[in-house]
Image (spheres, coloured by chain):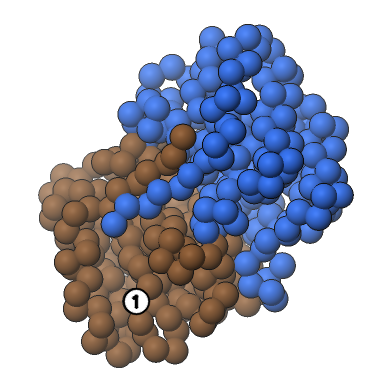
Chain colours: A blue, B brown
Amino acid sequence: MNVTLELPHWLDEALAPFGGLDTDETRMAAVIDLARRNVDHRTGGPFSAAIFETETGRLIAAGVNVVVPANAAIAHAEVMAVAAAGQTLGTFDLGAGAPTSLFASTEPCVMCMGVTVWSGVSRLLCAGRDDDARAIGFDEGPKHPGWVAELEKRGIEVVRDLVRSESIAVLQHYLDTDGEIYNAGGDHA
Amino acid sequence: MNVTLELPHWLDEALAPFGGLDTDETRMAAVIDLARRNVDHRTGGPFSAAIFETETGRLIAAGVNVVVPANAAIAHAEVMAVAAAGQTLGTFDLGAGAPTSLFASTEPCVMCMGVTVWSGVSRLLCAGRDDDARAIGFDEGPKHPGWVAELEKRGIEVVRDLVRSESIAVLQHYLDTDGEIYNAGGDHA
């Protein structure tokens, strides 16, 4: 049996402008734009992520949240981006060649914080705070209270609040368009 | 772009005896046997997981660790089992129909603990302890110190140490056969 998770049909085309981004801010703004498109196309939740080569800024792969359309609780943006990047590079260790950075439109939930550790990236850059996701009803799960320090202890630099207002705007846009807050289990949310 | 994660070719056949298991202990022993086969076939790490319908004991899906062969940091046993179960049931919420249980040959790492919360299962049953995985060199990541209580707070019953000695035996078997301890990033392990 294979597990196949489809990314939205519009994603490849949306990555065309990613070649010419030369700062962390412009890269993050482009990543957040993927979350906005995911909301507008109604192809998943308001979250996006991407893996870039740290030195050159070359895009390795990107992902968006497709939990509901892919019938997959695991299909958060960071999981999709890390899995797609592994396929692209041909290794589970995204730091095996050149150092890489994970950009996330919102700080990772507990699962995606774990994905960050296992991925081999050496930088995690986040726009929105986990509290911003909680504010619109998404559960972030039982994260270690000192998760940022725990990542840094493992050699992963964490950059927070990069273009945060744009991420918050997309989360609000999701609410305004009646997006589904899809936490599994009625009594867990 | 699609993300495709292949489970080992031998897995479907190995699930044939799963129909006649009528206790949690026999189910867990069968799940752990998948981890042993994964070691013997050299198709991944010494970890396995499965989703059962809680009331009937019907198997929904199973998974094993395929991180190295699938080039995917996310491809832990629990992730594969939850994703496969979502495909089988046609929903991201594995508790949407009948209540379901996640059996794991070893207590989940931080990522898979998060997967457990998002999966919609209402029971998590574990054989080996996370300390047993650490004892052979696998990092379990920055888990919330009170992760069991955190899961129970979210309505997920946690059963530990079920057939634990069998799980430890498989972990030791992996070491004895020179299995790869594959933590990403030389300095993170």
Asked whether, in this view, residue B169 is left or right of residue A80, the answer is: left
| Pointer 1 residue | B59
- Residue A180: x and y in percent read 73, 58
Q: Quadrant of the N terminus of chain A?
A: bottom left
Residue B62 seen in the current view: yes
Asked whether, in this view, residue B28 is left or right of residue A161, the answer is: left
Measured along the vertical axis of the image, is residue B150 above or below residue A110? Answer: below
- Residue B64: x and y in percent read 30, 57
Measured along the vertical axis of the image, is residue A22 above or below residue B10? Answer: above
Residue A65 vs residue A7, the one in the foreground: A7
**Secondary structure state at the residue bearing disc 1:** strand
Q: Residue at x 53, y 20 (%)?
A: A59
Q: Residue at x 54, y 10 (%)?
A: A56
Q: Residue at x 67, y 20 (%)?
A: A27
Graded by Cα atoms within 10 Å as few (under 14), some (14 to 19) or many (20 or more), the crowding at tag 1 reads many
- Residue B115: x and y in percent read 52, 59
Q: Amino acid at mark 1?
A: Leu
Residue A131 vs residue A34, the one in the foreground: A34
Q: Chain of mark 1?
A: B
Callout count? 1
Q: Residue at x 54, y 50 (%)?
A: A75
Residue B172 seen in the current view: no
Q: Quadrant of the C terminus of chain A?
A: bottom right
- Residue A126: x and y in percent read 70, 33
Measured along the vertical axis of the image, is residue A174 above or below residue B102? Answer: above
Measured along the vertical axis of the image, is residue B17 above or below residue B82? Answer: below
| Picture quadrant of residue A120 | top left
Asked whether, in this view, residue B113 is left or right of residue B18, the answer is: right
